[in-house]
Image: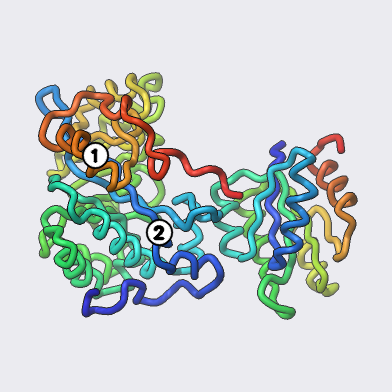
């Protein structure tokens, strides 16, 4: 199982925090802020885990759902975690229907996310 | 700049942080990889293929990620104009070689009817004769056989340019495309070249494309040659145009201009493996690191 993780969020501070916390644990972290950037990476890089926000361009957007659909199609081996601060029940339901492994609401302790990643990647935390 | 419009004209792109970086001055970096021709037991340079990378230090520095990003943004026309301008600018002043290969998306040729005329103007501006230009058609998505696409190909031919079809054997670079495009060059994807020395089926594919090229009045190019044993198989298959790291890695124009390199590269037959003893050029010859 690849220990490479793609984190997709429009907030740079969140991406920074992921990098700071996960890289010392031995993960390779790539970060993307745009839907198309994330899709391009998923097309050419093999990731074990995708951690994605649902809204990348505003409070009413839903690029994350499109990204989940794309990841399921192009990178079926990649486990998917949604981490969002504004997901409605309808969006959660749709995300789960599209096959995400976990749907979490922000904020979340990084340690908890690391444990989840280790579990999904079948790795001892 | 061309009177037909700005370098980035033609629509598409849709904005965004990365897109702005691409459009910035020096947003794209151009290098050149020679395509060699084997004649009478010697290698000479047949053409230089211009290769472009995205902004340094970004996820799209890698060309494959860059062009996937561009396609997702539907920004093919804009990126092709930028890449063409950057490539011609870098090529200006290089000694003449028979060909300068420029990658252009099929979608650009379909969506932008003015592209052939614009390309000719840009070539004139950078003093590159049209007869040297090879338009290498990349991207494998519809509309491959759009009416405008085919008209643009005809226009490019009328201007004296040659047509190459990239990634032959994969995706949309199929027999129909070969018939529609009538390419001068069939570029065989590395998938069929790598490991051909140990795979009879790959050898059969190479021989069949080489034969097809001859019958269509075209030339076959083997891409991605990285192993001497594969090179031998490629040559034995009747393929005389060769490209790959084994022969020469992509070079910056600065490196190509170095006199000692230039003299040997252009004016004399080149021994196989030439370039191996040259010092590394960090700006152009190394693999782009994995995205961060």
Q: Give whichever of B171, B94 is nearer the camera.
A: B94
Give the colour scheme of this rendering: rainbow
Q: Establish whether labels 1 and 2 are both on one chain.
A: yes
Q: Nearer the viewer, residue A57 or B167?
A: A57
- Residue at left 38%, top 34%? B280
Number of dots carrying numbers: 2
Quick one: label 1, few (<14), some, or many (20+) residues within 10 Å?
Answer: many
- Is B127 in front, or is A122? B127
Expressed as whole percent of the image width and height from the top left, the position of residue B259 reads 19, 38
Can residue B183 be seen in the rendering of this structure?
Answer: yes
Q: Residue at x 14, y 47 (%)?
A: B95
Residue B78: where, in percent of width, then height? 38, 70
Q: Secondary structure at mark 2?
A: loop
* Number of the label disc, if any, that sits on residue B95: none
User: Which comes sooner in the sequence, label 1 or label 2?
Assistant: 2
Kindly state the secondary structure of the residue where label 1 is placed: strand
Image point (36%, 73%), residue name: B8
Q: Disc 2: which chain?
A: B
Residue shown at 72% from the left, 36% from the top: A1
* Residue B154 visible to the viewer: no
How busy is the neighbourhood of tag 2: few (under 14 within 10 Å), some, or many (20 plus)? many
Q: Quadrant of residue B265?
A: top left
Quadrant of the rendered structure where residue B140 is? bottom left
**Lateral position of residue B273 relative to residue B27, left or right:** left
Which residue in the protein does label 2 denote?
Answer: B28
Q: Is residue B67 left or right of residue B100?
A: right
Mark number, residue B35: 1
State left or right for residue A110 relative to residue B158.
right
Disc 1 is attached to a residue of which chain? B
The image position of residue A5, as x and y in percent, is 70, 48
């Amino acid at each position: 199982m690849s220990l490479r993780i793609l984190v997709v969020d429009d907030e740079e501070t969140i991406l920074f925090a992921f990098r700071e916390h996960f890289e010392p644990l031995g993960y390779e972290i790539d970060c993307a802020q745009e839907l198309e950037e994330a899709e391009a990476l998923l097309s050419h890089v093999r990731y074990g885990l995708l951690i994605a926000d649902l809204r990348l361009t505003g409070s009413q957007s839903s690029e994350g759902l499109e990204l989940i659909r794309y990841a399921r199609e192009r990178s079926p081996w990649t486990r998917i975690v949604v981490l969002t601060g504004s997901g409605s029940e309808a969006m959660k339901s749709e995300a789960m229907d599209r096959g995400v492994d976990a749907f979490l609401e922000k904020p979340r302790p990084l340690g908890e996310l690391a444990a989840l990643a280790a579990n999904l990647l079948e790795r001892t935390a | 700049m061309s009177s037909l419009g700005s370098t980035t004209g033609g629509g598409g792109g849709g904005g965004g942080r990365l897109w702005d970086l691409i459009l910035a001055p020096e947003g794209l970096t151009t290098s050149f990889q020679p395509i060699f021709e084997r004649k009478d037991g010697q290698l000479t340079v047949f053409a230089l293929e211009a290769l472009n990378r995205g902004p340094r230090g970004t996820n799209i520095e890698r060309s494959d990620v860059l062009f996937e990003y561009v396609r997702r943004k539907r920004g093919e026309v804009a990126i092709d104009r930028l890449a063409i301008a950057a490539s011609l600018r870098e090529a200006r002043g290089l000694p003449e070689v028979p060909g300068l290969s420029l990658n252009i998306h099929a979608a650009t040729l379909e969506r932008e009817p003015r592209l052939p005329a614009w390309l000719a103007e840009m070539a004139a501006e950078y003093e590159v004769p049209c007869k040297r230009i090879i338009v290498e058609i990349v991207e494998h998505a519809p509309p491959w056989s759009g009416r405008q696409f085919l008209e643009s190909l005809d226009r490019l031919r009328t201007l004296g340019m040659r047509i190459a079809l990239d990634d032959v054997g994969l995706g949309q670079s199929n027999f129909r495309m070969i018939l529609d495009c009538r390419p001068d060059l069939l570029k065989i994807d590395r998938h069929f070249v790598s490991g051909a020395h140990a795979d009879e089926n790959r050898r059969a594919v190479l021989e069949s494309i080489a034969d097809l090229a001859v019958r269509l009045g075209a030339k076959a190019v083997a891409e991605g040659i990285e192993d001497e044993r594969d090179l031998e198989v490629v040559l034995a298959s009747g393929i005389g145009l060769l490209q790959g790291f084994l022969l020469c890695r992509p070079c910056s124009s600065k490196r190509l201009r170095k006199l000692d390199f230039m003299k040997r590269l252009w004016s004399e037959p080149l021994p196989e493996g030439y370039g191996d003893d040259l010092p590394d050029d960090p700006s152009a010859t190394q693999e782009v690191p994995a995205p961060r």
